[in-house]
Amino acid sequence: MIDEKYIEWMHLAIDGKLSRKDREKLDVYLQSNAEAREFFEQLLRTVEILDHTEEIVPPDDLKQRIMSSIDFSRYAAKEQKASFAERLTEWFYRPQAKLVYAFAAGLLLGLLALSPFWFKYAQPDVTDLSGTIGVLPDNRFRTIEEIPVQTSGLAGTIEIKKYQQFISVNIHIKTINTAQLTIEFDPGLLQWNRFIPQDAEAVNLKYKSNTLTFLLSSSTEMSLFFRQLQPDARLTLRLIGDGNLVVEKTLVIE
Amino acid sequence: MSDREDKELVKRCVKGDQKAFEALVDKYQKTVFNIIYRLIHNYDESEDLTQKVFIKVYENLDAFNSRYKFFSWLYRIAVNESLNHIKAKKRLTPLEEGYAASEKRPDETFNGKEVSERLQNAINQLNANYRTVIILKHFQNCSYSEIADIVDIPEKTVKSRLFTARQLLKDILIKEGITGHD
């Protein structure tokens, strides 16, 4: 007679699922019960035969038979129907896309690093300017304002003209003593980009806090050019001679 | 190849990648063929059924639930197809193929091929439920829980069936003289 509990333990022991403690108890039981011992040995032999039985070798052409019997159009057709969004999403996760991301990030960083230089040259420090720059023919400009200058020490005119988005400030002034001209403007509305003559030192020109300052001496013939970025751009001119404010004029250019 | 790799291949198959399915066939054709052969014990029919199983698997790949192991799902299809085949065959031939009893005595020795064949005859004497758990446990090394998933029964039932099946097989092997009393 074999206790059912020990029969179950025999199976668990064969499958490696019996605890060490219970295995020891099983061993003690088997030593004391010859019938149980014989039963266990027969079970072990059965399992040994099962576990050592060779695999059956399938026919050589089995794979070929399987593959030739499959209708592969089933999912191929489905693939073609994949939505644009699905294909786009899939593309974003491809390794090649990572290269594109890296390139774009590098480009952006490069632009950010260069941006201070960009703004510097977009609104240049005119004290560094010299040379000759071509100018649009004067006859295309229409006069917006002509300011006459006539004092005991100063004589001449300041003309403000416009052609398309270009504004020119033309200074024709003769002076006995040194005079100072300032032009104040909003760089968000007007971009100052060239002047004639091109030698900044010759006219003693300075640019600071959105204001251009010139020191005029004897005879000055000079043109300044702005590009108008927005309508209603404001431009303020002040001319000081012998310590007196000779001209102060604010223009709003449409 | 891990289950994760299997699932990756399944995904590729569903996107129309034939090579991915070929890789799955390469990996599992021999196992599936063996499960089927051990269950139905007919070489030519095992070949046909293996082919049928893979067609079924391919056609249902888009319905495969990735919560389960791929091989569990594949083996379940193979087992079910085999059991259905056995049932259908029983209906056609009510008298099951007779088991040719060995004329050899228990003390005679058998070569490996003979033992394999006689073992298969012994397994055939078990009912389909017992046969299935024996095959999955001892020929495919499946754990109790994997067998439970494949056969879709509780793990406790797997153990109970397996233990009974082993004892029945032990008795048949003794009776047929493949293993003997000491």
Image (cartoon, rainbow, N blue to C red):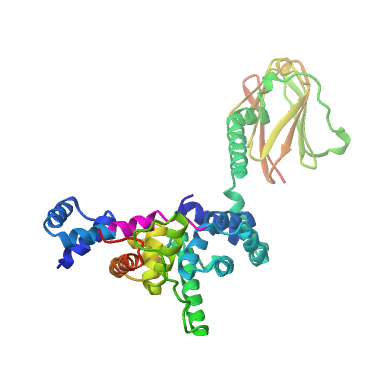
**In the displayed structure, does residue B82 sit left or right of residue A20?**
right
The answer to whether residue A247 shows anywhere in this view is no
Question: What is the x, y in percent for residue A177?
Answer: 70, 15
- Which one is nearer the viewer's eye here, A201 or A76? A76
- Which one is nearer the viewer's eye here, B50 or A228? B50
Magenta-colored span: A44-56
Q: What residue is shown at x 67% (from left), y 19% (from top)?
A: A127
Vertical position of residue A233 compared to residue B172: above or below: above
Q: What residue is shown at x 49% (from left), y 61% (from top)?
A: B34
Question: What is the x, y in percent for residue A85?
Answer: 61, 59
The answer to whether residue A228 shows anywhere in this view is yes
Vertical position of residue A81 compared to residue A55: above or below: below
Q: What residue is shown at x 53% (from left), y 54% (from top)?
A: B27
- Which one is nearer the viewer's eye here, B12 or A31? A31
- Which one is nearer the viewer's eye here, A5 or B54? A5
**Is residue A55 covered in magenta?**
yes
Q: What residue is shown at x 64% (from left), y 61% (from top)?
A: A67
Q: Main secondary structure of the magenta part?
A: helix
Q: Locate residue B145: give its quadrant.
A: bottom left
Vertical position of residue A94 compared to residue A185: above or below: below
Q: Locate residue B61: give its quadrant.
A: bottom right
**Is residue B26 covered in magenta?**
no
Q: Quadrant of the N terminus of chain A?
A: bottom left
Question: What is the x, y in percent for residue A49?
Answer: 37, 57
Question: What is the x, y in percent for residue A236?
Answer: 65, 35
